[in-house]
Amino acid sequence: MATPVRPSVDIHVVARKAGVSTATVSRVMNHVSTVDARLAARVNKAAAELCYTPNTQARALVLGKSGLLGLIVSEITNPFFPELIQSFELAAVERGYEILLGSTNYAPARMAQCVRRMVERKVEGVAVMTFGMDEDLLQELSGRAIPLVSVGSTQTIDAAVSIEVNYRQGIEEAVQHLAGMGHRAIALISGPLHLRGAELRRVAFVEAMAAIGLSPSGSHLVEGDHTMEGGLRAARQLFGSTPVPTAILCSNDMTAIGVLHAASACGLGVPEDLSVIGFDDIHMARFTVPPLTSVRMAPADLARAALDALPLRPLRTASGPVETGTVIPTHLVVRQTTGSPRRRGGRASGTWLRGKRMGRAEAAVSCGPEKPG
Amino acid sequence: MATPVRPSVDIHVVARKAGVSTATVSRVMNHVSTVDARLAARVNKAAAELCYTPNTQARALVLGKSGLLGLIVSEITNPFFPELIQSFELAAVERGYEILLGSTNYAPARMAQCVRRMVERKVEGVAVMTFGMDEDLLQELSGRAIPLVSVGSTQTIDAAVSIEVNYRQGIEEAVQHLAGMGHRAIALISGPLHLRGAELRRVAFVEAMAAIGLSPSGSHLVEGDHTMEGGLRAARQLFGSTPVPTAILCSNDMTAIGVLHAASACGLGVPEDLSVIGFDDIHMARFTVPPLTSVRMAPADLARAALDALPLRPLRTASGPVETGTVIPTHLVVRQTTGSPRRRGGRASGTWLRGKRMGRAEAAVSCGPEKPG
DNA sequence: GGCCGGAGAGAAAACGATTTCCAGGCCGCG
DNA sequence: CGCGGCCTGGAAATCGTTTTCTCTCCGGCC
């Protein structure tokens, strides 16, 4: 059967076949105005038989609306972002938009490319969850009245709506959880500190520590890079510091996975010898060995908040006040990488493997990262 | 300074400012034909000062080319796909294309949506790495002469170019690796068998086993779903089968991570009590505890092959012969989840944790999955 | 019975870019 | 010095859709 579709089946073909004008076809397709039921039926039949699909570009051209929303993230291979992207796309489709994805890989040059692409494709709004948005790029968007929302307080963009995250809350819970188990030597592996979100987490950590009378030494505040490799490196560094921390709080889950790897490679048992807490609570946190205690930042909430803030308002409302956005909560999810320091895992279901003890100094020297191909 | 960009700065504005016609501006922007150097300079200056960005939709409309390539994957939260997407995007940008992403989440309905979106946006080619492409959808693409490439032999689409993967090779290596260490009770956790790629891997496994004189019992061929949860469930099922397998080959790395989780929860040491091999060799395989032995299928190679096959040829060359595509090799990457059965890890750097022994039956009964929130 | 109002359908302009066609100017050659 | 060809720039057509404007037709009300 399969009617062979001619390469170009546009609205005129449909109109001719249905014996009406293109205007009528357009009205039928868009359910606008009232068209005689019999005519509409004829048009629909013709369209179906011809496999007519409206040309989105032509429509976008005349409408000045593309139906596209831009989403710029730092990297797609960090599992947190796919989770965010999925939520974002779902929420966007609900609202009749499609998303145009861009990943910067932490390179400002790629950020510029992303913004340019989005401008060219006439996106109706941009959500950014990475850094590198300088004044020029901002100008490029604001000059075209493209709304912008900054998600997760990645950087301060005073001209954009911003979805803030209450990092303090989850990190306080994490620190108190550790302190309550008796930890005092608690280290932090932060993210890259030029990311405002990472910096905020670091500050929250220091303040939460101070609130319980602890002040982490400089050697216990290591800057990571939000990768597993970075977590591994930072962990090895911390294993060599004095005093050796009994717990490590990580700025994201990738870092924590690197730390778990390092601990295992060095023969340190988790949580008996070392407690580890991640941040983001990616899906995989449930499946690490042992399952990772982490601070949850719900990507679906982030995505929804971003979209709610997005398509309506023009960026600079004529020197109007800066919009203050929603605040996303975070909270600790306790799994099995945290326990009391020095033996006594203390967890009821503690069937997790116990490493053979090994002197800390020995471990720090002997353990090395796997040389990846 | 920042020149406030007027909402609509089109080619006419630039032309007027530069004192030339729109045709000249177009020629300059596209580096086509020869334009007087001084004129070109004037045009470029005007364009820069006005922050002129050509309207992609208008260009696409007149050119009949959108500069978009569609990429349809099954799910974005499986880390293999982000790696593939990243490679694909990189290769696409090199060729002057952008990608339009679609994820089906294994739902045929979403596949239809994806195809429709891509047709509407006038993509110049589609790469598919999932299943669910039925005749109607195929027709929708072929009727519009949109080239299609099926990556990783996800399903048989006889009308499309297909990038085949030599699953056999890597799986043979894996089976021989295990057999060489003395394993005989080797189980397989496959992917969903309606995915042709998963089925092919299953067949390759059975044949590789047969080649060394083993024929796995039915209870050692479990169908998973390519998720960590599926791996966990399948592992628990296998732990209860007789004989209990000493090694498990998984259809992808997510499944393997689920198995590692299950083993750890049951007090089974990896690799002393159980060897595990994954498939895909996602980046994270290096960082599991212990690091995962896996069969590598280079996403960059897949992406490049797909793009090389893509944008040139029209789908059905007038009842011409089906194009046969490249074959991507796979090979085993040995890390630390594989070793001889029953004690004797046998690895030089074997500092990995050793679980306290526990009867198999006991383990199978006592261990259960963590109830996720 | 005539006029007015409203609704429904068609013709045509517009959206912003590319590109063909055409005209004019410059240079070279005879 | 004149003519022809080539190169460059401009006007206009085109892509497929939406939308305004206009026309026609019909019904109701005075």
Image (cartoon, coloured by chain):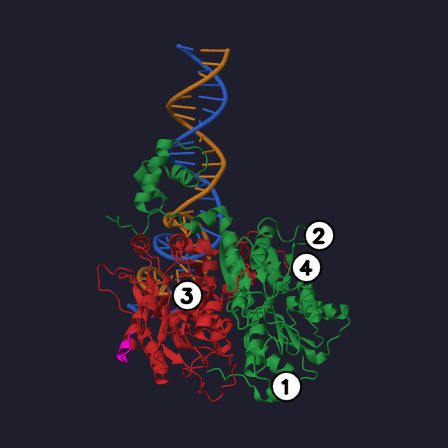
Chain colours: A red, B green, C orange, D blue
Is residue B49 shown above or below B326?
Answer: above
The residue lying at 65 percent from left, 75 percent from top is: B247
The chain carrying label 3 is A
Specify the segment rendered in magenta: A210-215
| Crowd band around label 4 with a 10 angstrom C-alpha radius: few (<14), some (14–19), many (20+) | few
- Which numbered circle lies on residue B321? 2
**Gap in Å between the C-alphas at discs 2 and 3?**
49 Å
Q: Nearer the viewer, residue A210 or A21?
A: A210
Residue A133 falls left or right of residue B265: left
Q: Tell me the quarter of the picture where residue B141 sits.
A: bottom right
Residue behind mark 1: B360
* Label 1 vs 4, first from the N-terminus: 4
Q: Are marks 1 and 3 in contact (CB under 8 Å)?
A: no
Looking at the rendered structure, whether the residues under marks 4 and 2 are on a common chain is answered as yes
Badge nearest the viewer, 1 or 4 = 1
Tag 2: residue type?
Pro
